[in-house]
Image (tube, coloured by chain):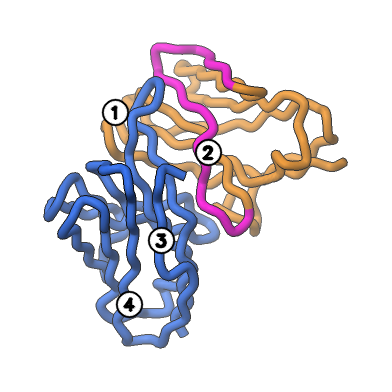
């Protein structure tokens, strides 16, 4: 999918439901992963991160799960609110680099009131 | 927002003209980055800097140059703008989070090249 707007994978949920957004990462050598939220017309906003020696990490209303076996990352948002409507994308440190990231194209989350 | 500002926020220019975008940060971060964001692509790295006068190319550096003469400012220059450089440009800094080196982004510059 595209990075903002057109032809992105989309997820539509009802307010109050839980949302799960998925990401497949590309490099088995990557050991650090981040989820970002991007609202229309704004810059990406850091949500939560996780290292490869973790399976799960929780923040405020968000949980990130990492499955290294299948190179899969997911973001769970509890009790989704209209303000959660945005594009969400994952990033991985490029093959283990400390300072360079590779970004996914994103999923558009729409929360219906 | 990690103290990052970008200027201008919007710009319309004509093909063949030079354009300079500015990224300013107030927290003395060593690493700074320029990305472009286009439909159909994730954020793509143009150039990055790891210190004053220390810069390196990213994956889409052709047609762009950068300069960093002081820690707080990272400039991106399009020497001769082309329509393919119409995009949204984001600056970012790297900062240690709880578990790694996270990047935080500025608000972006929307550039239209006619």
Residues in magenta? A40-59
From mark 3 to mark 2, how far is it between C-alphas? 19 Å
Helix, strand or loop under label 2: strand
Drawing shade for chain A: orange
Q: Which residue does the numbered mark 2 point to in the structure image? A: A36
Mark 3 neighbour density, 10 Å: few (under 14) some (14–19) many (20 or more): many
B42 up-or-down from A89: above or below: below
Between marks 2 and 1 in the image, the one whose residue lies nearer the viewer: 2
From mark 2 to mark 1, how far is it between C-alphas? 19 Å
Q: Which residue does the numbered mark 4 point to in the structure image? A: B19
In this rendering, position of residue A74 left or right of residue A90: right
Which chain does tag 1 point to? Answer: A
Drawing shade for chain B: blue
From mark 1 to mark 3, how far is it between C-alphas? 29 Å
Q: Which mark is residue A96?
A: 1
Between marks 4 and 1 in the image, the one whose residue lies nearer the viewer: 4
From mark 4 to mark 2, how far is it between C-alphas? 29 Å
Residue B92: x %, y % from top left: 37, 48
């Amino acid at each position: 999918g595209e990075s903002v707007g057109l032809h992105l994978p989309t997820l539509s949920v009802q307010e109050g439901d839980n949302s799960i957004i998925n990401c497949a990462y590309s490099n088995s050598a990557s050991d650090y992963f981040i989820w970002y939220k991007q609202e229309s017309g704004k810059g990406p906003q850091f949500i939560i991160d996780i290292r490869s020696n973790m399976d799960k990490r929780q923040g405020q209303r968000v949980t990130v799960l990492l499955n290294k076996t299948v190179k899969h990352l997911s973001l769970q948002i509890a009790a989704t609110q209209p303000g959660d409507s945005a594009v969400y994308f994952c990033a991985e440190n490029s093959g283990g680099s400390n300072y360079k990231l590779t970004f996914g194209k994103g999923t558009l989350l729409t929360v219906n009131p | 927002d990690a103290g990052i500002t970008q200027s201008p926020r919007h710009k319309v220019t004509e093909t063949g003209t030079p354009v300079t975008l500015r990224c300013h940060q107030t927290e003395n971060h060593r690493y700074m980055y320029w990305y472009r964001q286009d439909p159909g692509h994730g954020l793509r790295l143009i150039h990055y800097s790891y210190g004053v006068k220390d810069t390196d190319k990213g994956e889409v550096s052709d047609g762009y140059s950068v300069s960093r003469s002081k820690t707080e400012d990272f400039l991106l220059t399009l020497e001769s703008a082309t329509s393919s450089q119409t995009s949204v440009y984001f600056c970012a800094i790297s900062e240690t989070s709880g578990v790694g080196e996270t990047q935080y982004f500025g608000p972006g510059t929307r550039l239209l090249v006619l």
